[in-house]
Image (cartoon, helix red, strand yellow):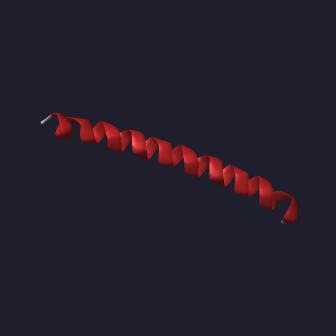
Amino acid sequence: MAKVAHEPVQRALWLGARRLFDERERLRLDRLAGPVG
């Protein structure tokens, strides 16, 4: 029961961390591609 209640929280944390990571990667790639493009 506790596991079922805990799962949505873990999923939300995972999605938030992934979104943050994707954002940072996009910014880093944009900075790298900026001078070249």
Task: Locate residue 10: give its quadrant.
Answer: top left
At a point 42% along the width and 46% down the height, the residue shown is 15
At a point 63% along the width and 47% down the height, the residue shown is 24
Instruction: Say if 9 sits above or below 25 in the image.
Output: above
Task: Locate residue 1: give its quadrant.
Answer: top left
Give the left or right position of residue 36, taking residue 21 as reference: right
Residue 21 location, x and y as percent?
56, 47
At a point 71% along the width and 57% down the height, the residue shown is 29
Instruction: Say if 37 sits above or below 23 in the image.
Output: below
- In the displayed orientation, state which residue is furthest to the right: 35
At a point 87% along the width and 59% down the height, the residue shown is 35
The image quadrant where one finds the C terminus is: bottom right
Badge count? 0
- In the displayed orientation, state which residue is furthest to the left: 1
Residue 31 location, x and y as percent?
78, 53
Residue 30 location, x and y as percent?
74, 56
Task: Locate residue 9: give its quadrant.
Answer: top left
Give the left or right position of residue 5, taking residue 36 as reference: left
Give the left or right position of residue 21, taking residue 15 as reference: right
